[in-house]
């Protein structure tokens, strides 16, 4: 007999476990996404690469500064006390940030706008005892503090107006020099020979002022020295400077100079005045591979308006010497008059004395060394000096191949021009060359390489059609594209 019990429908399975599974899956995905997000951010914070894409590498520290920061042994505090409407505020802020990043955790940086952060500015005044009445950078190492004014970090265009445009930014030079002074304490001592005459009193004053400024930046003291009043060069002389002397050294003074040069760590910078009468000094230089010639480096031609005779020499730097390699892309103008140098690269005497000579500056092709430079229209003849024309050279005695063992070598830089530091004609690159030479003669070539950053203004000219195209793209096309994409996504969701 057929079963008359009606078929019973099975009850639907509960959806609760399925929903719990979906929720747990979503929660795990969210947690995984957050873990990946924070992990990637953490890795990118600790391990990242930065690129300076500016045309002049304006935000990259020089190898000089990077080398110095890699040897920091003390904690450094830097406060950027600049009003944000200053024209150099972006450059200064980027600069101090580079010091913080490359300071191996030893440099702390704080930015203070004295017009907006009044409480923080007053607190910094109380801590440092500085007035902070102008824009600048405060650097503190232990109990020692230095304030660098805004004007010390820029080179303005020529002129007398206070608002003349900024031509170069030399903030890195100023900050690194201040760091050296605060950390190293008392600097090296350079003695400037006086009492031997000069072209003019103004030229001597310009040279002393420029060298004094370099001393503050490179952390050395400039001391005057009259050779007629001493019997021996000071024991603490890290360098001896003979700049534009007109009258020759006596036999006794030459003997003192030779004794100093034959010591363990002598440093000499000789900037020759072509009009000076210094046969004994020239003979001393000749014994060390650099002989000044009795000529003037010039260019002369006959033009429709008369004779043109040019004594200011356009020259180029050598790209192999550690002194001039950072400047090799620059062109230097030697003002006033220059004499050429006979540079002996190698002979038996120099090899026996372990002396190495290297050219630093060479005149461009159109110049020559003229013996009869007083003529109205001098021409090149057999007795004149033809290319290559060397205007500066370096001399090193006791050099060895291993750079670690070269700290006791004696070094000298000879320049056939005494006008490099004249206030009215000196270029920034002239100052950089002298600074590099001073660093080199005291065996600090690893500190060579800070050059000012050129400031350029770029202007984009747009015609009316280009302005209209930019308006349609930014005001109509781009917002319209976003709106269309939004409508497409909304429609696809509605259809699902």
Image (spheres, rainbow, N blue to C red):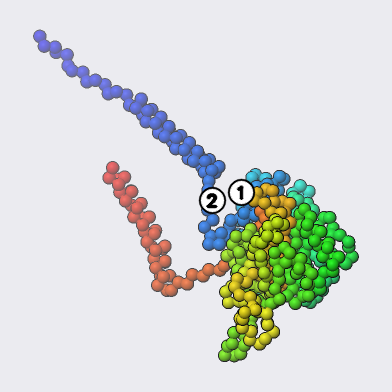
- Count residues near mark 2 (Cα–Cα under 10 Å), then give few for <14, some for 14-19, many for 20+: few
Please name the residue shown 53% across and 48% down the image.
Answer: 49
x and y percentages locating residue 495 in the rendered image: 27, 45
Quadrant of the image occupied by residue 231: bottom right
Most distant residue in the left direction: 1
Q: Which mark is residue 422?
A: none
The picture places residue 488, in percent across and down from the top left corner, at 32, 51
Front-most of 238 and 416?
416
Q: Position of residue 300 (x, y in %)?
A: 61, 83
Which residue occupies the foreground of this view, 9 or 404?
404
Question: How many tags in the picture?
Answer: 2
Residue at image point 76% right, 66% down: 284
Q: Quadrant of the N terminus?
A: top left
**Is residue 119 visible from the viewing direction of this image?**
no
Instruction: Name which residue lies at 64% across and 45% down.
Output: 104
Q: Is residue 396 above or below residue 369?
A: above
From mark 1 to mark 2, how far is it between C-alphas? 11 Å
Q: Tell me: residue 31, above or below residue 139.
A: above
Tell me the quarter of the picture where residue 363 sits.
bottom right
Quick one: which residue is furthest to the bottom in this view? 305
**Relative to 323, 472 lies left or right:** left
> 251 or 146: nearer the eye?
251
Name the residue located 41 percent from the left edge and 29 percent from the top edge. Answer: 24
Quadrant for residue 287, please give it: bottom right
Mark 1 touches mark 2? (CB < 8 Å) = yes
Does the image show residue 32?
A: yes
Say which residue label 2 marks.
Answer: 50
Figure quadrant of the C terminus: top left
Crowding around mark 1 (Cα neighbors within 10 Å: few <14, some 14 to 19, many 20+) is few
**Which label was assigned to residue 101?**
1
* Depth check, front residue: 298 or 113: 298
């Amino acid at each position: 007999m057929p079963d008359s019990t009606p078929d019973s429908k099975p009850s639907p399975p509960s959806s609760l476990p399925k929903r719990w599974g979906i929720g747990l899956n979503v929660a795990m995905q969210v947690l995984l996404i957050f873990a990946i997000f924070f992990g990637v951010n953490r890795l990118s914070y600790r391990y990242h690469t930065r690129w300076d894409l500016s045309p002049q590498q304006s935000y990259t520290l020089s190898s000089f500064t990077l080398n110095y920061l890699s040897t920091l042994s003390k904690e450094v505090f830097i406060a950027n006390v600049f009003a944000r409407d200053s024209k150099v505020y972006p450059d200064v802020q980027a600069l101090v940030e580079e010091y913080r990043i490359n300071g191996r955790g030893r440099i702390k940086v704080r930015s203070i706008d004295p017009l907006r952060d009044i409480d923080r500015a007053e607190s910094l005044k109380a801590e440092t005892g500085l007035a902070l009445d102008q824009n600048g950078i405060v650097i503190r190492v232990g109990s020692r503090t230095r304030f660098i004014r805004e004007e010390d970090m820029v080179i303005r265009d020529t002129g007398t107006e206070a608002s003349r445009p900024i031509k170069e930014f030399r903030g890195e030079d100023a900050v690194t020099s201040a760091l050296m002074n605060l950390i190293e304490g008392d600097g090296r001592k350079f003695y400037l020979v006086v009492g031997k005459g000069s072209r003019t009193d103004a030229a001597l004053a310009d040279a002393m002022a420029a060298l004094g400024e370099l001393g503050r930046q490179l952390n050395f003291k400039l001391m005057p020295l009259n050779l007629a009043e001493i019997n021996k060069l000071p024991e603490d002389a890290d360098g001896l400077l003979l700049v534009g002397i007109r009258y020759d050294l006596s036999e006794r003074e030459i003997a003192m100079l030779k004794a100093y040069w034959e010591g363990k760590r002598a440093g000499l910078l000789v900037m020759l005045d072509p009009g000076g009468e210094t046969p004994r000094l020239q003979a001393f230089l000749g014994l060390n591979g650099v002989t000044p010639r009795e000529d003037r480096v010039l260019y002369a031609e006959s033009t429709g308006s008369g004779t043109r005779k040019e004594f200011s020499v356009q020259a180029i730097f050598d790209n192999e010497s550690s002194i001039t390699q950072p400047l090799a892309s620059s062109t230097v103008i030697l003002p006033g008059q220059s004499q050429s140098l006979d540079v002996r690269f190698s002979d038996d005497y120099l090899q026996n004395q372990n002396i190495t000579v290297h050219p630093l500056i060479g005149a461009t092709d159109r110049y020559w060394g003229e013996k009869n430079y007083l003529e109205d229209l001098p021409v090149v003849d057999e007795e004149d000096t033809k290319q290559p024309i060397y205007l500066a050279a370096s001399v090193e005695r006791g050099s060895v191949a291993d750079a670690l063992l070269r700290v006791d070598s004696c070094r000298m830089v000879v320049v056939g021009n005494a006008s490099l530091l004249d206030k009215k004609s000196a270029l920034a690159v002239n100052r950089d060359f002298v600074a590099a030479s001073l660093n080199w003669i005291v065996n600090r070539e690893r500190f060579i390489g800070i050059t000012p950053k050129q400031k350029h203004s770029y202007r984009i000219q747009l015609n009316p059609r280009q302005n209209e195209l930019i308006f349609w793209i930014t005001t109509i096309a781009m917002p319209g594209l976003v709106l269309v994409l939004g409508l497409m996504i909304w429609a696809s969701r509605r259809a699902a």
